[in-house]
Image: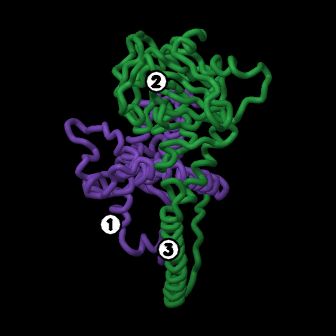
Amino acid sequence: MSDRRRTIVLPDADARRELRRRTRRDFLIGGLVAVGAIGGYEWVTHAKDDNGEPWPQRRVMDFNGKLAHSYLSNDHLMPTFRPDQIGHLKANGDIGMKQPLDPSKWKLGVAMGEGDPSLMLTLADIQMLPKIDMITQFCCIEGWNQIVHWGGARFSDFTKKYFQPGANLPKYVYMATAGEDYYVGLDMKSALHPQTLLAYEQNGAPLEYDHGAPLRLVIPVKYGIKNIKRIGLIRYTDERPADYWAEEGYDWFAGL
Amino acid sequence: MIWSGLLIYWAYPIYTAGPIHFFPQSLFNALHMNQRLADGMAMHFFFMWLFVINGILYVAYTIWSGEWRLLVPQSFSAFRDAWYVVLHDLHLRHEAPTQEKYNAAQQISYTAIVVMGIGSVLTGLAVYKPVQLNWLAGLFGGYAGARYIHFFLTMGYCLFFIVHVVQVALSGWNNFRGMVVGYELGNENE
């Protein structure tokens, strides 16, 4: 192999002068690049706030979400697990569930577009849909995960009941607790994913209070924050819905 | 990437070396790194693009310029030579093995760091999209396995960085200038 090192032959004093010149030049360039990099970093981390994060980061976050949305597919399924792998799921959030629940009074409002719900459903209405059992991993945005056995109805089956086959579906779904203290926004593609359930059973028993009784969303293609508990309202909409944690600096898409 | 990664790690800091936590809560508190998961994620998934683009440009340049021949070990004897370099640097061996631009220990570490970089991107993608890319997560033992490898690759960078900076400091000004300027003073008949 040839030696690729370049050699410049100069008289001693000239060589020293030439090296000094190049050193000055290159350290100056290096210094300017470093200052530029620090300036760029300061801008990216201190630009004007957009829902909890500097806007350049929010912009890239939304771009990443769009990219992930275009790759999302009903054929990309979360792997399912064996019953002996089921663990104990931590109950992490109770926003919108601080009032005691009266199961006999609970109703699920369904709204088509803006305005008041046009339908009020009971749990029995959901349980009439085909029941799906699945053992999947629940991934919290904090980094932990747990394997859980869920039982419930596919959101896609639920949606089919209210829209004609081939009808143009709205782009988004908004779900909220009864007082809208907690709310999530979902893209329609994720909502209709075959593993997205309106769940009323956990590990073979009815949902417990702190896990969102009587009805919660289980959406394995999203982080835990989107798996809203004690749903009181489902709204089909063409406007990108508000999302509790996306207003606190998190990714609106939050897809897995 | 390491800073924002730590902001994320704070939310679930489970890895230990025996009884010792890698990053105890007191450290996060002292550096005001607690309760900043959202900031960490926003930064991490912003700068990931720079990390990937930079990595692609670097590898493309070494291939285009032919520098890769100097960087990638060309035979298995590099491992033996690298060991001699380590002994030499620790003053346990008198002679250093012959070398070209980079010695065998440098070749192995500079090649390993690129492989680790690719590993970080792949395990990172597996943690980021464990359902859409579940085949990839599966390669690393699932979501938790990919997170584990992702973390320890980062510890590897920290080790590399420390050794690298110490070695540069020990090798002196002339070498450091050579790293930046690309030239060193030498005698014509050397």
Q: Which residue is mark 3?
A: A35
Q: Nearer the viewer, residue B174 or A98?
A: A98
Question: Can you tell which mark lies on residue B170?
Answer: 1
Q: Secondary structure at mark 2?
A: strand
Q: Nearer the viewer, residue A9 or A141?
A: A141
Chain letter of mark 1 equals B
Look at the image and tell me whether residue B164 can be seen: yes
Question: Can you tell which mark lies on residue A153?
Answer: none
Q: Nearer the viewer, residue A206 or B23?
A: A206
User: What residue is shown at x 57% (from left), y 66% (from top)?
Assistant: A5
Contact between marks 2 and 1 (CB within 8 A): the answer is no
From the viewer's perspective, is the residue at label 2 or at label 1 nearer? 2
Q: Which residue is mark 2?
A: A137
Instruction: Locate residue A193, reporting x and y percent.
Output: 62, 24
Mark 3 residue crowding within 10 angstroms, few (<14) / some (14–19) / many (20+): few
Mark 1 residue crowding within 10 angstroms, few (<14) / some (14–19) / many (20+): few
Location of residue A61 with respect to B102 vertically, above or below = above
Q: Is residue A248 left or right of residue B87?
A: right
Alpha carbon of mark 2 to alpha carbon of mark 1: how far?
50 Å
Q: Is residue B26 left or right of residue A177?
A: left
Q: Nearer the viewer, residue B179 or A188?
A: A188
From the viewer's perspective, is the residue at label 3 or at label 1 nearer? 3
Q: Residue furthest right?
A: A166
Location of residue A247 with respect to A146 vertically, above or below = below
Colour convention = by chain
Identify which amino acid the numbered label 2 is placed on. Gln
Instruction: Locate residue A240, reporting x and y percent.
Output: 64, 42
Chain letter of mark 3 equals A
